[in-house]
Image: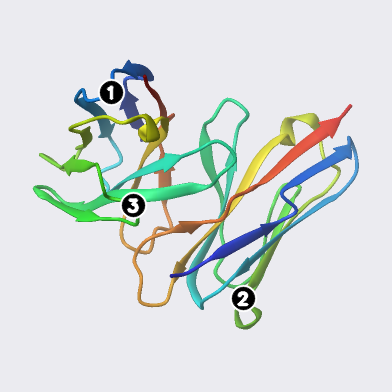
Amino acid sequence: GQQVQQSPASLVLQEGENAELQCNFSSTATRLQWFYQHPGGRLVSLFYNPSGTKHTGRLTSTTVTNERRSSLHISSSQTTDSGTYFCAIVGTGSNRLTFGKGTKFSLIP
Amino acid sequence: EAAVTQSPRSKVAVTGGKVTLSCHQTNNHDYMYWYRQDTGHGLRLIHYSYVADSTEKGDIPDGYKASRPSQENFSLILELASLSQTAVYFCASSVDRSNSDYTFGSGTRLLVI
């Protein structure tokens, strides 16, 4: 089945630094999404980005479909960015999302 | 505001007992999903549904049943709860199979003892 690998598993930075989260997947993805999970557990969709680059606020997602990878860049990170970030794909011939194990992101004030 | 509401927020169940987790959405979405999350892991799909009165197996359906009596409601049923089913369960909905508009509930923490 399709696999999604995220790196690093955890990331600790100081407030104000930039963060780069990686996602690699084993099959061609027809859909790719980034999700954010609050420390309290709530999940929200950040980006629907099967290819190319998208921006929202301080977040940038870049997906290179033929290289089977995506990245999430967080600029000037803030304490409110702390939480876990998940990458999820829908592979070719599938109709369901497969999630990676996530990157736990923590900030030092 | 469109939303996905799960109940209960948390539950303690006895091994061998029956557990029903409920999900209600006001998004007018056709697709609904049940995922489980174990500590330190991503989400894994248990069951999903794309129309009322029909459910489909996900990646880890064993030990779970699902019910979709209406477009708005989707339940997850553990007929004989086991210790290994201790986890956080998330319900989600999406407008169609492209999953591009994906909304999650707040989760249900289930502890089986």
Same-chain check, marks 1 and 3? yes
Q: How packed is label 3: few (under 14 Cα within 10 Å), some, or many (20 or more)?
A: few
- Of residues B83 and B54, the one nearer the viewer is B83
Mark closer to the observer (1, 3): 1
Query: Picture coordinates of residue B2 (x, y %)?
Result: 36, 35
Q: Chain of mark 2?
A: A
- The picture quadrant where one finds residue A39 is top right
Question: Residue at position x 23%, y 33% from top?
Answer: B78
Amino acid type of the residue tagged 1 in the rendering = Thr
- Of residues B43 and B12, the one nearer the viewer is B12
Q: Residue placed farthest to the bottom in the image?
A: A66
Q: Secondary structure at mark 2?
A: loop
Question: Residue at position x 33%, y 52% from top?
Answer: B60
Q: Secondary structure at mark 1?
A: loop
- Can see residue B31? no
Are the two marked residues, 1 and 3, in contact with CB atoms closer than 8 angstroms?
no
Question: Residue at position x 59%, y 73% from top?
Answer: A51
Q: Which residue is mark 1?
A: B15
Q: Secondary structure at mark 3?
A: loop
Left or right side of B106 for B23: left
Q: Chain of mark 1?
A: B
Q: Chain of mark 3?
A: B
Amino acid type of the residue tagged 2 in the rendering = Arg
- The picture quadrant where one finds residue A109 is top right
Query: Picture coordinates of residue A40 (x, y %)?
Result: 58, 25
